[in-house]
Image (cartoon, rainbow, N blue to C red):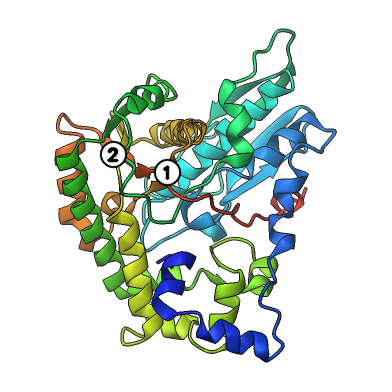
Protein backbone atom coordinates (compact mmCIF):
# COMPACT_ATOMS: atom_id res chain seq x y z
CA UNK A 1 0.00 0.00 0.00
CA UNK A 2 1.61 3.25 -1.12
CA UNK A 3 0.76 6.31 0.97
CA UNK A 4 1.06 9.42 -1.17
CA UNK A 5 2.93 12.31 0.35
CA UNK A 6 0.35 14.98 -0.47
CA UNK A 7 -2.62 12.98 0.78
CA UNK A 8 -0.96 11.90 4.00
CA UNK A 9 0.17 15.42 4.78
CA UNK A 10 -3.40 16.67 4.36
CA UNK A 11 -4.70 13.95 6.65
CA UNK A 12 -2.11 14.20 9.39
CA UNK A 13 -1.47 17.93 9.31
CA UNK A 14 1.81 19.81 9.46
CA UNK A 15 2.23 20.25 13.21
CA UNK A 16 4.57 17.35 13.75
CA UNK A 17 6.92 18.66 11.07
CA UNK A 18 7.23 21.90 13.02
CA UNK A 19 7.88 19.92 16.18
CA UNK A 20 10.55 17.81 14.54
CA UNK A 21 12.26 20.85 13.06
CA UNK A 22 12.29 22.47 16.51
CA UNK A 23 14.08 19.41 17.84
CA UNK A 24 16.90 19.98 15.38
CA UNK A 25 16.15 16.95 13.19
CA UNK A 26 17.14 17.37 9.53
CA UNK A 27 13.89 16.49 7.82
CA UNK A 28 15.14 17.51 4.38
CA UNK A 29 17.35 14.46 3.92
CA UNK A 30 16.80 12.58 0.68
CA UNK A 31 18.15 9.20 -0.52
CA UNK A 32 20.72 10.70 -2.89
CA UNK A 33 22.74 7.48 -3.14
CA UNK A 34 19.67 5.50 -4.23
CA UNK A 35 18.87 7.90 -7.08
CA UNK A 36 22.47 8.12 -8.32
CA UNK A 37 21.83 5.51 -11.08
CA UNK A 38 19.56 8.05 -12.77
CA UNK A 39 22.53 10.41 -12.99
CA UNK A 40 24.93 7.70 -14.16
CA UNK A 41 22.71 6.46 -17.00
CA UNK A 42 24.53 6.91 -20.29
CA UNK A 43 28.00 7.42 -18.84
CA UNK A 44 29.56 4.02 -19.67
CA UNK A 45 32.06 3.17 -22.41
CA UNK A 46 31.02 -0.47 -22.88
CA UNK A 47 27.94 -0.33 -25.15
CA UNK A 48 26.28 -3.10 -23.17
CA UNK A 49 26.73 -1.31 -19.85
CA UNK A 50 25.60 1.88 -21.54
CA UNK A 51 22.33 0.21 -22.59
CA UNK A 52 21.92 -1.56 -19.26
CA UNK A 53 22.37 1.69 -17.34
CA UNK A 54 19.10 2.83 -18.90
CA UNK A 55 17.41 -0.58 -18.73
CA UNK A 56 17.67 -0.71 -14.94
CA UNK A 57 15.45 2.40 -14.81
CA UNK A 58 12.55 0.44 -16.33
CA UNK A 59 9.26 -0.01 -14.42
CA UNK A 60 8.86 -3.22 -12.46
CA UNK A 61 6.46 -4.58 -9.82
CA UNK A 62 6.97 -3.18 -6.31
CA UNK A 63 10.28 -1.77 -7.56
CA UNK A 64 11.88 -5.16 -6.91
CA UNK A 65 14.32 -4.74 -9.85
CA UNK A 66 14.29 -8.52 -10.41
CA UNK A 67 17.14 -8.68 -12.90
CA UNK A 68 20.69 -10.00 -12.99
CA UNK A 69 22.90 -9.82 -16.08
CA UNK A 70 25.93 -11.80 -17.18
CA UNK A 71 28.49 -9.96 -19.36
CA UNK A 72 31.15 -12.67 -19.40
CA UNK A 73 31.01 -13.09 -23.21
CA UNK A 74 32.06 -10.16 -25.39
CA UNK A 75 29.20 -8.30 -27.09
CA UNK A 76 26.61 -10.45 -25.34
CA UNK A 77 24.20 -10.01 -22.43
CA UNK A 78 22.44 -12.86 -20.68
CA UNK A 79 19.52 -11.85 -18.47
CA UNK A 80 18.42 -13.89 -15.46
CA UNK A 81 15.60 -13.39 -12.99
CA UNK A 82 16.81 -12.59 -9.49
CA UNK A 83 14.88 -15.24 -7.58
CA UNK A 84 15.38 -13.33 -4.33
CA UNK A 85 13.18 -10.52 -5.69
CA UNK A 86 9.93 -12.38 -6.33
CA UNK A 87 6.46 -11.60 -4.93
CA UNK A 88 5.12 -15.04 -3.98
CA UNK A 89 1.90 -13.86 -2.31
CA UNK A 90 0.55 -11.41 -4.90
CA UNK A 91 2.37 -12.87 -7.92
CA UNK A 92 2.50 -16.61 -7.25
CA UNK A 93 3.07 -17.51 -10.91
CA UNK A 94 5.78 -14.84 -11.33
CA UNK A 95 3.78 -13.38 -14.21
CA UNK A 96 4.17 -9.76 -13.10
CA UNK A 97 7.88 -10.23 -12.46
CA UNK A 98 8.24 -11.58 -16.01
CA UNK A 99 6.38 -8.55 -17.38
CA UNK A 100 8.89 -6.36 -15.53
CA UNK A 101 11.76 -8.27 -17.16
CA UNK A 102 10.15 -7.50 -20.52
CA UNK A 103 10.22 -3.79 -19.66
CA UNK A 104 13.93 -4.11 -18.87
CA UNK A 105 14.71 -5.80 -22.20
CA UNK A 106 12.84 -3.20 -24.23
CA UNK A 107 14.61 -0.25 -22.65
CA UNK A 108 17.93 -2.05 -23.16
CA UNK A 109 17.11 -2.51 -26.84
CA UNK A 110 16.06 1.11 -27.26
CA UNK A 111 19.19 2.42 -25.53
CA UNK A 112 21.42 0.24 -27.70
CA UNK A 113 19.70 1.47 -30.86
CA UNK A 114 20.35 5.04 -29.73
CA UNK A 115 24.08 4.27 -29.91
CA UNK A 116 23.83 2.46 -33.25
CA UNK A 117 23.65 -1.13 -31.99
CA UNK A 118 21.22 -3.80 -33.07
CA UNK A 119 20.20 -6.21 -30.33
CA UNK A 120 19.21 -9.72 -31.37
CA UNK A 121 17.18 -11.32 -28.59
CA UNK A 122 16.57 -14.99 -27.94
CA UNK A 123 13.97 -15.46 -25.22
CA UNK A 124 14.27 -18.41 -22.82
CA UNK A 125 17.14 -20.03 -24.76
CA UNK A 126 17.28 -22.99 -22.35
CA UNK A 127 13.53 -23.42 -22.02
CA UNK A 128 11.08 -22.15 -19.43
CA UNK A 129 8.98 -23.12 -16.47
CA UNK A 130 5.36 -22.02 -16.84
CA UNK A 131 4.67 -22.40 -13.13
CA UNK A 132 7.69 -20.66 -11.59
CA UNK A 133 10.74 -18.80 -12.84
CA UNK A 134 13.97 -20.68 -12.23
CA UNK A 135 17.72 -20.32 -12.70
CA UNK A 136 17.59 -20.66 -16.48
CA UNK A 137 18.18 -17.47 -18.49
CA UNK A 138 15.29 -15.20 -19.41
CA UNK A 139 16.98 -13.90 -22.54
CA UNK A 140 20.22 -13.94 -24.45
CA UNK A 141 21.15 -10.76 -26.38
CA UNK A 142 23.82 -10.14 -28.97
CA UNK A 143 24.93 -6.54 -29.61
CA UNK A 144 26.03 -5.72 -33.16
CA UNK A 145 27.18 -2.32 -34.39
CA UNK A 146 25.11 -1.54 -37.44
CA UNK A 147 25.38 1.44 -39.75
CA UNK A 148 22.00 3.05 -40.22
CA UNK A 149 20.50 1.65 -37.02
CA UNK A 150 17.50 3.88 -36.36
CA UNK A 151 16.91 5.29 -32.88
CA UNK A 152 13.51 4.73 -31.29
CA UNK A 153 11.58 7.99 -30.97
CA UNK A 154 10.30 7.02 -27.52
CA UNK A 155 13.77 6.69 -26.03
CA UNK A 156 13.97 10.44 -25.41
CA UNK A 157 11.41 10.00 -22.62
CA UNK A 158 13.23 7.27 -20.67
CA UNK A 159 14.74 9.67 -18.13
CA UNK A 160 11.43 11.42 -17.39
CA UNK A 161 9.26 8.28 -17.33
CA UNK A 162 7.55 7.58 -14.03
CA UNK A 163 4.80 5.37 -12.60
CA UNK A 164 2.63 8.09 -11.12
CA UNK A 165 1.26 7.01 -7.75
CA UNK A 166 -0.40 10.34 -6.93
CA UNK A 167 -4.09 11.29 -7.34
CA UNK A 168 -4.95 12.68 -10.76
CA UNK A 169 -6.66 15.98 -11.49
CA UNK A 170 -10.35 15.14 -11.89
CA UNK A 171 -11.03 18.52 -13.52
CA UNK A 172 -8.85 17.63 -16.52
CA UNK A 173 -10.33 15.00 -18.84
CA UNK A 174 -8.15 12.94 -21.15
CA UNK A 175 -9.00 13.56 -24.80
CA UNK A 176 -10.21 10.46 -26.70
CA UNK A 177 -7.67 11.00 -29.48
CA UNK A 178 -4.87 10.37 -26.96
CA UNK A 179 -5.81 6.68 -26.96
CA UNK A 180 -4.99 6.33 -30.64
CA UNK A 181 -1.55 7.83 -30.04
CA UNK A 182 -0.97 5.43 -27.17
CA UNK A 183 -2.05 2.44 -29.22
CA UNK A 184 0.58 3.30 -31.83
CA UNK A 185 3.29 2.68 -29.23
CA UNK A 186 2.21 -0.92 -28.59
CA UNK A 187 3.58 -3.93 -30.45
CA UNK A 188 1.32 -5.51 -33.06
CA UNK A 189 1.31 -8.86 -31.25
CA UNK A 190 -0.09 -7.33 -28.05
CA UNK A 191 -3.68 -6.08 -28.01
CA UNK A 192 -4.16 -2.54 -26.73
CA UNK A 193 -7.37 -1.39 -25.09
CA UNK A 194 -8.35 1.88 -23.54
CA UNK A 195 -11.28 4.06 -22.58
CA UNK A 196 -11.92 7.60 -21.37
CA UNK A 197 -15.69 7.13 -21.44
CA UNK A 198 -17.30 8.37 -18.22
CA UNK A 199 -19.27 5.18 -17.56
CA UNK A 200 -16.26 2.96 -18.21
CA UNK A 201 -14.16 5.13 -15.90
CA UNK A 202 -16.71 4.85 -13.11
CA UNK A 203 -17.07 1.09 -13.43
CA UNK A 204 -13.33 0.43 -13.66
CA UNK A 205 -12.68 2.76 -10.75
CA UNK A 206 -15.03 0.63 -8.68
CA UNK A 207 -13.56 -2.69 -9.82
CA UNK A 208 -9.97 -1.63 -9.18
CA UNK A 209 -10.95 -0.11 -5.82
CA UNK A 210 -12.49 -3.40 -4.70
CA UNK A 211 -9.49 -5.45 -5.86
CA UNK A 212 -7.10 -3.12 -4.05
CA UNK A 213 -9.20 -3.35 -0.89
CA UNK A 214 -8.98 -7.13 -1.03
CA UNK A 215 -5.20 -7.02 -1.31
CA UNK A 216 -4.88 -4.68 1.67
CA UNK A 217 -7.38 -6.61 3.79
CA UNK A 218 -5.81 -9.99 3.05
CA UNK A 219 -3.09 -10.20 5.73
CA UNK A 220 -0.51 -12.21 3.82
CA UNK A 221 -0.71 -10.13 0.63
CA UNK A 222 -0.64 -6.83 2.49
CA UNK A 223 2.25 -8.01 4.66
CA UNK A 224 4.23 -8.70 1.50
CA UNK A 225 4.04 -4.99 0.70
CA UNK A 226 4.75 -3.88 4.27
CA UNK A 227 7.86 -6.05 4.36
CA UNK A 228 9.10 -4.06 1.37
CA UNK A 229 8.57 -0.64 2.94
CA UNK A 230 11.79 1.38 2.95
CA UNK A 231 11.19 4.16 5.46
CA UNK A 232 13.53 7.13 5.46
CA UNK A 233 16.62 7.94 3.44
CA UNK A 234 18.90 5.58 5.34
CA UNK A 235 16.76 2.52 4.62
CA UNK A 236 16.27 3.53 1.00
CA UNK A 237 19.99 4.13 0.42
CA UNK A 238 20.86 0.83 2.09
CA UNK A 239 18.27 -1.19 0.15
CA UNK A 240 16.99 0.76 -2.88
CA UNK A 241 14.33 -1.65 -4.00
CA UNK A 242 10.83 -2.08 -2.64
CA UNK A 243 8.46 0.74 -1.73
CA UNK A 244 10.08 4.11 -1.09
CA UNK A 245 8.88 6.23 1.84
CA UNK A 246 11.53 8.93 1.97
CA UNK A 247 11.54 12.71 2.03
CA UNK A 248 10.73 15.24 4.74
CA UNK A 249 7.20 14.05 5.50
CA UNK A 250 7.98 10.38 5.99
CA UNK A 251 11.26 11.05 7.78
CA UNK A 252 9.27 13.12 10.28
CA UNK A 253 6.38 10.69 10.64
CA UNK A 254 8.87 7.90 11.27
CA UNK A 255 10.84 9.96 13.79
CA UNK A 256 7.70 10.79 15.78
CA UNK A 257 6.49 7.18 15.75
CA UNK A 258 3.43 7.94 13.62
CA UNK A 259 4.57 5.80 10.69
CA UNK A 260 6.36 2.47 10.87
CA UNK A 261 5.82 -1.05 9.64
CA UNK A 262 4.01 -1.73 12.91
CA UNK A 263 1.61 1.21 12.61
CA UNK A 264 1.04 0.38 8.93
CA UNK A 265 -0.32 -3.04 9.91
CA UNK A 266 -2.33 -1.81 12.90
CA UNK A 267 -5.80 -1.36 11.42
CA UNK A 268 -6.73 1.05 14.23
CA UNK A 269 -3.79 3.39 13.60
CA UNK A 270 -3.88 6.73 11.84
CA UNK A 271 -1.13 5.55 9.49
CA UNK A 272 -3.21 2.60 8.33
CA UNK A 273 -6.41 4.58 7.88
CA UNK A 274 -4.65 7.46 6.16
CA UNK A 275 -2.82 5.06 3.88
CA UNK A 276 -6.04 3.34 2.90
CA UNK A 277 -7.63 6.67 2.01
CA UNK A 278 -4.53 7.61 0.03
CA UNK A 279 -4.37 4.54 -2.19
CA UNK A 280 -8.10 4.71 -2.86
CA UNK A 281 -7.58 8.33 -3.89
CA UNK A 282 -5.49 6.89 -6.71
CA UNK A 283 -7.95 4.32 -8.03
CA UNK A 284 -10.82 6.75 -7.54
CA UNK A 285 -9.25 9.61 -9.52
CA UNK A 286 -8.55 7.64 -12.68
CA UNK A 287 -9.46 9.76 -15.69
CA UNK A 288 -9.20 6.85 -18.09
CA UNK A 289 -7.84 3.34 -18.26
CA UNK A 290 -5.55 1.43 -20.61
CA UNK A 291 -4.84 -2.27 -20.77
CA UNK A 292 -2.84 -4.91 -22.65
CA UNK A 293 -4.09 -8.36 -23.61
CA UNK A 294 -2.21 -11.33 -25.06
CA UNK A 295 -3.78 -14.33 -26.77
CA UNK A 296 -2.13 -16.77 -24.39
CA UNK A 297 -0.30 -16.47 -21.10
CA UNK A 298 3.07 -17.95 -22.07
CA UNK A 299 6.30 -16.59 -20.66
CA UNK A 300 7.05 -15.12 -24.08
CA UNK A 301 3.68 -13.36 -24.05
CA UNK A 302 4.48 -11.94 -20.64
CA UNK A 303 7.81 -10.58 -21.90
CA UNK A 304 6.09 -9.03 -24.92
CA UNK A 305 3.49 -7.46 -22.68
CA UNK A 306 6.29 -5.89 -20.65
CA UNK A 307 7.98 -4.57 -23.78
CA UNK A 308 4.71 -2.94 -24.84
CA UNK A 309 3.94 -1.67 -21.33
CA UNK A 310 7.12 0.35 -21.05
CA UNK A 311 6.50 1.74 -24.53
CA UNK A 312 3.01 2.71 -23.43
CA UNK A 313 4.48 4.36 -20.32
CA UNK A 314 6.90 6.33 -22.48
CA UNK A 315 4.09 7.35 -24.82
CA UNK A 316 2.00 8.66 -21.91
CA UNK A 317 5.03 10.62 -20.77
CA UNK A 318 5.33 12.16 -24.23
CA UNK A 319 1.70 13.33 -23.97
CA UNK A 320 2.17 14.79 -20.49
CA UNK A 321 -0.03 12.09 -18.98
CA UNK A 322 0.52 10.10 -15.83
CA UNK A 323 0.24 6.32 -15.85
CA UNK A 324 0.01 3.96 -12.89
CA UNK A 325 -0.41 0.19 -13.13
CA UNK A 326 -3.41 -1.21 -11.24
CA UNK A 327 -2.45 -4.86 -11.03
CA UNK A 328 -4.58 -6.04 -8.11
CA UNK A 329 -7.48 -7.39 -10.21
CA UNK A 330 -5.03 -9.24 -12.48
CA UNK A 331 -3.30 -11.20 -9.75
CA UNK A 332 -3.66 -14.95 -9.45
CA UNK A 333 -4.12 -15.57 -5.74
CA UNK A 334 -7.48 -17.08 -4.66
CA UNK A 335 -8.99 -14.18 -2.72
CA UNK A 336 -9.13 -11.95 -5.79
CA UNK A 337 -10.51 -14.64 -8.11
CA UNK A 338 -13.93 -13.00 -8.58
CA UNK A 339 -12.35 -9.68 -9.57
CA UNK A 340 -9.88 -11.46 -11.86
CA UNK A 341 -12.75 -13.09 -13.71
CA UNK A 342 -14.71 -9.84 -13.85
CA UNK A 343 -11.84 -7.87 -15.35
CA UNK A 344 -11.22 -10.57 -17.94
CA UNK A 345 -14.91 -10.75 -18.84
CA UNK A 346 -14.86 -7.01 -19.37
CA UNK A 347 -11.50 -6.39 -21.05
CA UNK A 348 -10.88 -9.72 -22.81
CA UNK A 349 -14.38 -11.03 -23.62
CA UNK A 350 -13.07 -13.08 -26.55
CA UNK A 351 -10.41 -14.82 -24.50
CA UNK A 352 -6.78 -14.15 -23.73
CA UNK A 353 -5.00 -12.80 -20.66
CA UNK A 354 -5.13 -9.23 -19.44
CA UNK A 355 -1.46 -8.72 -18.68
CA UNK A 356 -1.53 -5.07 -17.63
CA UNK A 357 -4.14 -2.52 -16.57
CA UNK A 358 -3.41 1.07 -15.66
CA UNK A 359 -5.06 4.37 -14.94
CA UNK A 360 -4.22 7.52 -16.87
CA UNK A 361 -4.73 11.18 -16.10
CA UNK A 362 -2.98 14.44 -15.42
CA UNK A 363 -1.06 14.67 -12.17
CA UNK A 364 1.86 16.39 -10.55
CA UNK A 365 5.40 15.42 -11.39
CA UNK A 366 6.91 12.78 -9.15
CA UNK A 367 10.50 11.97 -8.25
CA UNK A 368 12.41 9.05 -9.79
CA UNK A 369 12.29 5.76 -7.93
CA UNK A 370 15.39 4.45 -6.14
CA UNK A 371 17.55 1.99 -8.03
CA UNK A 372 20.41 -0.37 -7.32
CA UNK A 373 23.58 0.63 -9.19
CA UNK A 374 24.38 -1.30 -12.32
CA UNK A 375 27.36 -2.95 -10.68
CA UNK A 376 25.07 -4.57 -8.11
CA UNK A 377 23.15 -6.25 -10.93
CA UNK A 378 26.09 -7.84 -12.69
CA UNK A 379 26.48 -11.59 -12.18
CA UNK A 380 29.71 -12.62 -10.51
CA UNK A 381 31.63 -14.92 -12.84
Quarter the N terminus occupies? bottom left
- Numbered circle sitting on residue 323: 1
Please state the horizontal and vertical placement of residue 333, each as a whole percent of the image. Answer: 28, 59
**Picture residue at 44% right of the left edge, 24% below the top:** 185
Vertical placement of 314 versus 269: above or below?
above
| Mark count | 2
- Numbered circle sitting on residue 2: none
Vertical placement of 134 versus 54: above or below?
below
- The answer to which of 95 and 162 lies nearer the viewer is 162
Identify the image quadrant of residue 231.
Answer: bottom right
Identify the image quadrant of residue 77.
Answer: top right
Q: Is there CB contact under 8 Å for labels 1 and 2?
A: no
- The answer to which of 292 and 169 lies nearer the viewer is 169
Please state the horizontal and vertical placement of residue 259, each as a whole percent of the image. Answer: 49, 82
User: Mark 2 sits on what residue?
Assistant: 354
**Picture residue at 34% right of the left edge, 50% below the top:** 326
Task: Report whether residue 4 is seen.
Answer: no
How would you rate the neighbour count of disc 2 (Cα within 10 Å): few for under 14, some for 14-19, many for 20 or more?
many
**Picture residue at 49% right of the left edge, 67% below the top:** 5
Vertical placement of 242 versus 125: above or below?
below
Task: Report whether residue 120 is seen.
Answer: yes
- State the SS at label 2: strand
Please state the horizontal and vertical placement of residue 301, each as a whole percent of the image. Answer: 39, 32
Amino acid sequence: MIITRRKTLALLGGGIITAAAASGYAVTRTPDQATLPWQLAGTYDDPRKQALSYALLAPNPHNRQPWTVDLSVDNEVTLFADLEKLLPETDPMNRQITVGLGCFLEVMRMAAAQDGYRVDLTLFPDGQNHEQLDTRPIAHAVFTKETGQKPDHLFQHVMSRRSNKEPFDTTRPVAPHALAQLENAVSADVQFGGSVDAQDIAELRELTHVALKIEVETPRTYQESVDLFRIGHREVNANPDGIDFSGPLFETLHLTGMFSRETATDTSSTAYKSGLDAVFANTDTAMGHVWLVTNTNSRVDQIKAGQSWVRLNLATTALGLGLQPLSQALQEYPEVGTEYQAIHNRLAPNGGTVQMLGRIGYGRQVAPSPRWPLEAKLAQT
